[in-house]
Amino acid sequence: MGIMELFNQISSGTKTGPVEYIITGLGNPGIQYQDTRHNAGFMVIDTIAAKYGADVKKIKFKSLCGECTIGGKKCLLMKPSTYMNNSGEAVVEALNFYKLGIENLIVIYDDISLEPSKLRIRRKGSDGGHNGIKSIIYLTGEDTFPRVKIGVGKKPHPQYNLADWVLSSFKADEVPLIKEAADHAAEAVELMVSGKINDAMNKFN
């Protein structure tokens, strides 16, 4: 790294040390899944990247990655390209590479039990039937990672196929609600990496 590049990073508030947090949004790669409910995690990563000046385009850890500083901590933003059911493969690679504990992982993903615009922040928990979380828990052997759930709305009726629902696009009137939720999630993540998860839970749960 040249002196000028280092100076520019310091001037812009970008931290140059090792990654301290991994922030992973869950979703499926490919243009056909871009605006679907199951990709709410990717949408939040894009919002965080825009807010903190990250360029999430580097291919690493079976993901698209980018780095930024949030709350004074150097963070890796990740959008796994493994497809949802194998999200844990990307997460484990990144955790092992940076030698980080599971508590330094924040996972952002969709939740059909919450209405659009609603968030639910948790310190730990089961997979709740979410295949991406199931993969992470299975491959890390841990369920004690903080997570941010993004409401995407429940199925229109009980007989509606779950896969069809989560792979459907948001309705026009839901789009601003999801954008609002993504903004709130970005704010919550800053509190979480700053050691203020209780504040995040009190403000957004």
Image (cartoon, grey):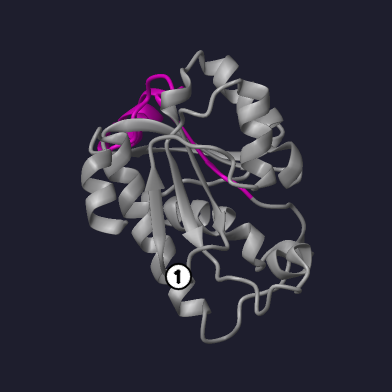
Q: Work out whether residue 126 or residue 17 is closer to the camera in this orientation and state it.
A: 126
- Left or right, residue 67 beside residue 183: right
Residue at x 52%, y 17% (from the top left corner): 98
- Left or right, residue 52 beside residue 202: right
Q: Is residue 84 above or below residue 33?
A: above
- Residue 4 shown in magenta: yes
**Magenta residues (range):** 1-26
Q: Is residue 60 visible?
A: no
Residue 101 x, y percent position in the rendering: 46, 18
Residue 128 x, y percent position in the rendering: 58, 46
Residue 133 x, y percent position in the rendering: 61, 40
Q: Work out whether residue 155 or residue 203 is closer to the camera in this orientation and state it.
A: 155
Is the C terminus in the top left, top right, bottom left or bottom right quadrant? bottom left
Look at the numbered disc 1 and give the secondary structure of its residue: helix
- Residue 39 shown in magenta: no
Tell which residue pokes out farthest to the top in this image.
99
Tell which residue pokes out farthest to the bottom in this image.
173
Which residue position is annotated with label 1?
A: 179
Q: Work out whether residue 83 or residue 116 is closer to the camera in this orientation and state it.
A: 116
Residue at x 21%, y 46% (from the top left corner): 199
Residue at x 45%, y 78% (from the top left corner): 176
